[in-house]
Image: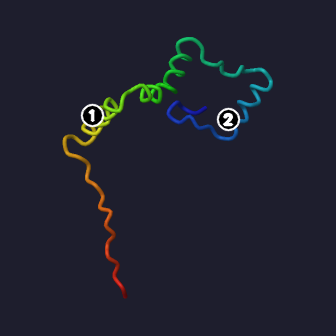
Amino acid sequence: MTDKKNPRKDFTQVAFGVFQQATGEVAPKPDLTGKKAMSRKGGLKGGKTRMETLTEEQRTELATKAARARWGDAAPAKKSCAAKPRSTK
C-alpha cells in the first residue's frame, strides 16, 4: 500500500479495495460523527458566515491587517496599466 505522504493509489490497489468492499471483507469507512462531524460542518461554512456578520469597517480592518502581515508596512507594488509602445518593423 502507499504511505501516508502519497495518498494516490495505482490501478491494482484501487481494484483490490473495490473487490474487498464488494465481497464484504472490508467495510467502507463510516461517516464522521460527533465532534469531528460538527467541526467539519463549522469549518465548511465558517468563513463565509463570519464575513456576512461583520460590518464593512470590520472587514476593512481585517483586510488591512492581513495585507500588513503579508507585505509589511509597504504596500504591494501596483502593476502599470499603461501599454508598452510596440515597435513597427
Vertical placement of residue 84 versus 37, above or below = below
Question: Residue 5: x percent and y percent?
Answer: 50, 33
Vertical placement of residue 77 versus 41, above or below = below
Question: Residue 62: x percent and y percent?
Answer: 31, 32
Task: State left or right for residue 72 relative to residue 58.
Answer: left
Task: State left or right for residue 21 relative to residue 79.
Answer: right
Label 2 crowd (10 A; few <14 / some 14-19 / many >=20): few
Dot label at residue 65: 1
Q: Label 1: state its secondary structure.
A: helix
Number of residue marks:
2
- Which amino acid type is marked by label 1? Lys
Residue furthest out toward the right: 23
Task: State left or right for residue 66 relative to residue 42.
Answer: left
Vertical placement of residue 33 versus 67, above or below = above
Query: What residue is shown at x 30% (from left), y 58% (from top)?
Result: 79
- Which amino acid type is marked by label 2? Gln
Question: Residue 85: x percent and y percent?
Answer: 32, 76
Dot 1 or dot 2, earlier in sequence: 2
Label 1 crowd (10 A; few <14 / some 14-19 / many >=20): few
| Residue beneath disc 2 | 13
